[in-house]
Image (cartoon, rainbow, N blue to C red):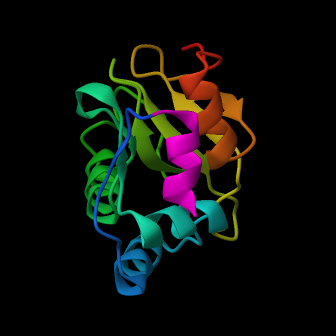
């Protein structure tokens, strides 16, 4: 289903073999979160979506785990606000990252935010993963 959705948007996407349910559970357990349904569906069909120039529009489950661990390990504390309330899942190609906000009860909202690495701002860009992908392709997401 999702591969067809992406192909309907552009032929510039590449896909990976599906993630397992266990791969997704490991991410959720490590950060004590529940990922959005659309992201889980995408990962179960294709463990990551790359655009032209290998841009990680949707990272594979392992990269989601590793990148979020990296940004939470403490060495960014003196430069940025904490990242505990975000789950990063994709990149812009210019250093900024896309993320879901995490509520106090560990639920990732469907909304997509972009974290600006230069000024540490966190701005809303889309109401869902599907709109994030659609609007990215259409050039509607401005960073």
Q: In this view of the protein, which residue sits in the foreground, 40 or 85?
A: 40
Residue 22 counted in the magenta span: no
Q: Which residues are magenta?
A: 1-10
* Secondary structure mainly formed by the magenta segment: helix
Give the number of callouts. Answer: 0
Q: Position of residue 54 (x, y in %)?
A: 24, 34
- Is any atom of residue 122 visible in this view? no
Residue 2 counted in the magenta span: yes
- Quadrant in which the N terminus appears: bottom right
Q: In this view of the protein, which residue sits in the foreground, 46 or 9?
A: 9
**Is 137 placed above or below 40 here?**
above
- Is any atom of residue 56 visible in this view? yes
Quarter holding residue 92: top left
Q: Residue at x 38, y 74 (%)?
A: 30
Q: Residue at x 50, y 44 (%)?
A: 7
Q: Position of residue 143 (x, y in %)?
A: 54, 14
Q: Position of residue 93 (x, y in %)?
A: 33, 23
């Amino acid at each position: 289903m999702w591969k067809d959705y992406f192909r309907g948007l552009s032929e510039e996407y590449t896909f990976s073999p599906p993630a397992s349910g266990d791969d997704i559970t490991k991410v959720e357990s490590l950060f004590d979160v529940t990922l959005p349904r659309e992201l889980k569906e995408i990962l179960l069909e294709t463990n990551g979506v790359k655009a032209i120039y290998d841009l990680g529009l949707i990272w594979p489950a392992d990269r989601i785990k590793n990148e979020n661990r990296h940004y939470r390990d403490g060495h960014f504390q003196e430069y940025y606000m904490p990242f505990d309330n975000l789950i990063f899942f994709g990149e812009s190609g210019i250093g900024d990252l896309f993320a879901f906000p995490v509520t106090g009860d560990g639920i990732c909202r469907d909304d997509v935010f972009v974290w600006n690495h230069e000024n540490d701002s966190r701005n809303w860009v889309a109401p869902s993963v599907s709109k994030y992908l659609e609007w990215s392709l259409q050039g509607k997401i401005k960073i």
